[in-house]
Amino acid sequence: MKVLVPVKRVVDYNVKIRVDSQSQSIDLTNIKMSMNPFDEIAVEEAIRLKESGQVEEIIALSIGPSQCQETIRNALAMGMDRGIHIETEHSPEPLIVAKLINEIVKKEEADIVILGKQAIDDDCSQTGQMLSALMKCSLATFASNITFDDDRVIVTREIDGGLQTIKLQKPTVITTDLRLNEPRYASLPNIMKAKKKIIDKYLPDDLNIDMTPKLDVIKIEEPPKRQGGGKVETIIELVEKLKNEAGVI
Ligand code: AMP
């Protein structure tokens, strides 16, 4: 069984985002970039499935500029077998990403695709869902546990107010939630080994995918600055303020 894990290169979650002067994008100058945290969880899960002998090969795939190779190398250092890089100028919108992943799924005959539930830069949470539609296959979003039962995949999903367990036919698409696992750190020997692992490279033209976007970003803006708070001496003063200044009661 083969598992494909798409990993996105995003602005590190510790970085304070700056909007660029034309308000069209995020300013990426000298900014630390990392693997999307939900994709690290997906990589960890694929490695655990391989270590438990349930999966034969695990492949990391990233779509974007040449620096995405660093993200793939990180996944290889964690324990993925090999990488695939589809080189594009920027990371495309979710529908195009889903179409590109779908082509790789066909080429590699992958049985399971494990994605992050969302990328922390665009917060779209769309790619996994679109991919399963393109693959015409089953889908389990927000997974907090993955096991196998004969030929089926059993996934526990985090839903409002509880957990739902479902049985899926392969091929299948799974998206990871936070509680699925805790990703490992890459050890130094594994970082060295990862340098020798293979990364195959494609261009969108090799896969015959039209890269014309269907979304236009009109504007990106920072959230309004928070107003400073104030202290009140009595409950009566608080109620006054809620009535007259905040207008909430
Ligand atoms: P999104 O739908 O943009 O929130 O992304 C959901 C998931 O799709 C991510 O966690 C990744 O697993 C995958 N993904 C999105 N964009 C890319 C990309 N450029 N390269 C690889 N995987 C991606």
Image (cartoon, rainbow, N blue to C red):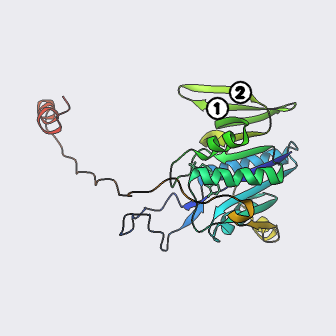
Compared with 168, 32 (above or below) is below
Compared with 236, 120 (above or below) is below
Compared with 179, 15 (above or below) is below
Whether residue 77 is visible, yes or no, is: no
Whether residue 243 is visible, yes or no, is: yes
Quadrant, the N terminus? top right
How far apart are the alpha carbons under marks 1 and 2?
8 Å
**Residue depicted at x 44% and y 68%:** 27
**Which label number is shown at residue 100?**
none
* Residue 141 location (% of width, % of height): 63, 37
* Residue 125 location (% of width, % of height): 56, 44
Residue type marked 1:
Arg
Label 2 CB, ligand 1: below 8 Å?
no
- Residue at far bottom of view: 30
Whether the residues at callouts 1 and 2 have beta carbons within 8 Å, the answer is yes
Asked which quadrant contains residue 140, the reply is: top right
Is residue 190 rendered to the left or right of residue 41? right
Which class describes the residues within 10 Å of circle 1: few (<14), some (14-19), or many (20+)? many
Is residue 36 rendered to the left or right of residue 54? left
| Residue marked by disc 2 | 166
Is residue 140 rendered to the left or right of residue 213? right
Asked which quadrant contains residue 68, the reply is: bottom right
**Which label number is shown at residue 157?**
1
Q: Secondary structure at mark 2?
A: strand
